Image: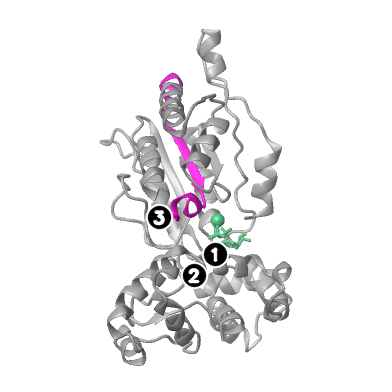
Amino acid sequence: MDDSIVHARKAQQEIVKVSVNNEKEREVLRTNFHLPPAPPIFYGRDEIVQIVISQLVPSQDEKQAGHTAILGTGGIGKTSVALSVIHSPAIQAHFQEHRYFIACDSLMDPDGIITALATAFNISASGNLSSRQKSVLSQLGRYVGFVGRPILIFLDNFETPWEPPSTRGQVEEILSNLAGTPNVTILLTMRGAERPYGVPWSRPFLPPVSTLDNDSARKLFLMMSDVPEDDPTLFELLDALDNLPLALLKRWKMERTAMLNRGDENRLTNLDVSIQVSLSSERLQISPITLSLLQILSMLPDGAHTSELVAMSINHQDVPGAITILRQVALVQESGSTGRIRMLSPVREHLRSYYP
Ligand SMILES: Nc1ncnc2c1ncn2[C@@H]1O[C@H](COP(=O)(O)OP(=O)(O)OP(=O)(O)O)[C@@H](O)[C@H]1O
Ligand SMILES: [Mg+2]
């Protein structure tokens, strides 16, 4: 996660002032929240930012806006898009100060989410999970009722609590309850290509965040590097790196040697950690063929069609299911134009270094 987010999370405790007379009610309305700043450098995401804004702010004939999930590969720029959205003038005007950020990357289960909500909204609840869940959600509902205005809850990295299959149902139930609270709008980011079940997500679904377009990647690269604008290898380099956001890409370039230094966990980059998390996901573990498919794809920069991957594998019938899993955890993508399944080059590099 970005340093600025960590700082923002630790640094601020803000009190929401709502005009209610009753002192007791005032007490309930104190919330601990912190909003990380908008990304200082942000290129080429105008279209997706506008789509998300239009999904979150209701049109004239709608009472309440829809909920939106920003999906995509680790490090592709989901949080940056979300932060840019929540600091946009339209979202500020609609939700005003009622924009809440909850980092979910360390919340491992339903209990973690309930505790994080209780902390963020300064709600106290005791007892077992089920009674705390009821109590926190109903107090939150009362809080939103007191506020009497639309509130936006931004859940960043929701894949962490959502991923374990054994508790996914409970996590989805909490999210569904939250999303069903009148006046609450949910914005979440999640690695992968799947949305949690049980929430009326805005339609049409937002497509996963893609890599930057050539022009934006080039501008970003020129701004962050000392490469001259007319360097003939510039396009080749960007192409080889799949136009990944440059802050990350630059680090990847610098630390590539360290990444290749196998077995030294301390030297893993954020990108490496993100890929490792996807690789160790339970969904991959239950389908062993996924790793051999990844190894094949790591040798094919232009990817391959599903039928070719079937032909290359021993367990033919398992291949389509395994490709679905790999797409869900965003380790591979299907090209819209060619239909080929391929991986972004840093994932390819990682596979070739750690799983040759
Ligand atoms: N459009 C952009 N322009 C410039 N830099 C960007 C852009 N998008 C992302 N970045 C930078 O790329 C890095 C990764 O972005 P971000 O944290 O938004 O990705 P993410 O998809 O949320 O990652 P994760 O899956 O780890 O949560 C950050 O350093 C961010 O500042
Ligand atoms: Mg993120």
Give the magenta part as a residue range: 144-164
Residue 165: image tag:
3
Q: Is 128 in front, or is 185?
A: 128
Separation (CA) of disc 3 from disc 2: 29 Å
Q: Is residue 154 magenta?
A: yes
Of the numbered discs 2 and 1, the one sitting upstream in the chain is 2
- Element carrying mark 3: helix
Q: Left or right of 166: which side holds 260?
A: right
Q: Nearer the viewer, mark 2 or mark 1?
A: 1
| Whether the residue under disc 1 has CB within 8 Å of ligand 1 | no
Q: Give residue 76's position: percent from left, percent from top.
A: 53, 65
The quarter of the image holding the C terminus is: bottom right
Q: Give residue 154's position: percent from left, percent from top.
A: 49, 43
- Name the residue rendered at 39%, 43% in the picture: 170
Of the numbered discs 1 and 3, the one sitting upstream in the chain is 3
Separation (CA) of disc 2 from disc 1: 20 Å
Of the numbered discs 3 and 2, the one sitting upstream in the chain is 3
Label 2 crowding class (10 Å Cα cut-off): few <14, some 14-19, many 20+? some
What's the residue type where badge 2 is placed?
Thr
What residue did someone put label 2 on?
Answer: 211
Vertical order, 52 against 35 (above or below): below
